[in-house]
Amino acid sequence: MSEHLIQIEQHGAVRLLRLNRPEALNALTTGLLGHLRQMLEAAAEDGATRCVLMTGAGRAFSAGQDLSDPHVAPSRDPGTPPKDIGHLLEHYYIPLALRLRSMPIPVVAAVNGVAAGAGASLALGCDLVVAGESASFIQAFSKIGLIPDCGGTWLLPRLVGRAKALEMALLGDRLKAADAAALGLIARVVPDAELPDTAMALAQKLAAMPTRALAETRRAMDEALKLDFEEALKREAGLQSQLGFADDYLEGAAAFLDKRKPEFKDR
């Protein structure tokens, strides 16, 4: 059944990946996590795909980890030792989060409905996050005695600052999409009915751009968070040196001078 956990559609150079457990609000299982990672790897290796668009089937993006999954479900038998949730993270969440953050092409998240727990972290790990106006984000870990994972402890303070990140993580309150956008947690909010078309248009726009430069922009910004200013400047120089020899720069500069639309092909 794992082949049905992710719906795949190809729209030109955009690959749409739709989490497909609508009856469970797309709660994350080991099967879904493993399959999503495989689908991201396949998109990364497909030279014809230049952007990934991720969303959820039905009325939610993802409600987070499915607590009935055998890898995490607590036993009701007092004599049975608890599950090692760290094992789940090591073997499923960490590889998925790292794959997402190292994609050679941009990834857009279209958040429809709730994005909770690891589902929120999954969305926020994408390059651009656009949400429908009825969407919401919840860091629900504290309510079951856990901490944010799937990159949540890294992403939240960098996106909204320490004070707001702690408020979200400690209280676990629902954050409306409009408030998430105002805080800088996500890129934009649109009417629910416009979300699919708006997200696809963004993905198509990114797919027509120099995707290698876009991926390096993400990487440079992530790395700059742990560098001092001079080191960041030197990192920029090194990347510009590499990109300046690439065909996309030559094409982009020529198109600008010729006053025509460029045709980017690098990945």
Image (cartoon, helix red, strand yellow):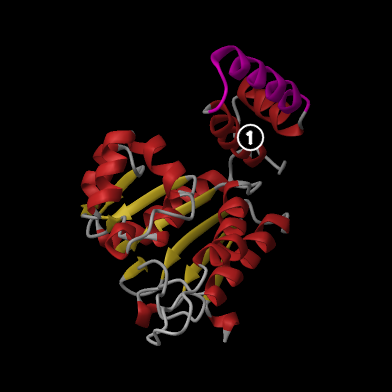
Residue 19 showing in the rendered view:
yes
Q: Which residue is label 1 attached to?
A: 216
Q: Amino acid at mark 1?
A: Glu
Residue at the farthest right position: 245
Q: Residue at x 27, y 39 (%)?
A: 164
- In the depicted view, which residue is nearer to us: 182 or 86? 86
Q: Is residue 164 left or right of residue 68?
A: left
Span highlighted in magenta in the image: 226-245
Name the foreground residue: 169 vs 266: 169
Q: Is residue 128 left or right of residue 31?
A: left
- Residue 122, horizontal then vertical, whole percent: 46, 56
Q: State yes or no: residue 236 in magenta.
A: yes
Q: How many marks?
A: 1
Of residue 203 and residue 131, the one placed in the foreground of this image is 131
Q: Residues within 10 Å of mark 1 (few under 14, many from 20)?
A: many
Q: SS for tag 1?
A: helix
Image vertical order of residue 93 relative to residue 217, above or below:
below
Q: Is residue 42 above or below residue 261?
A: below
Residue at 62 percent across and 16 percent down: it is 231
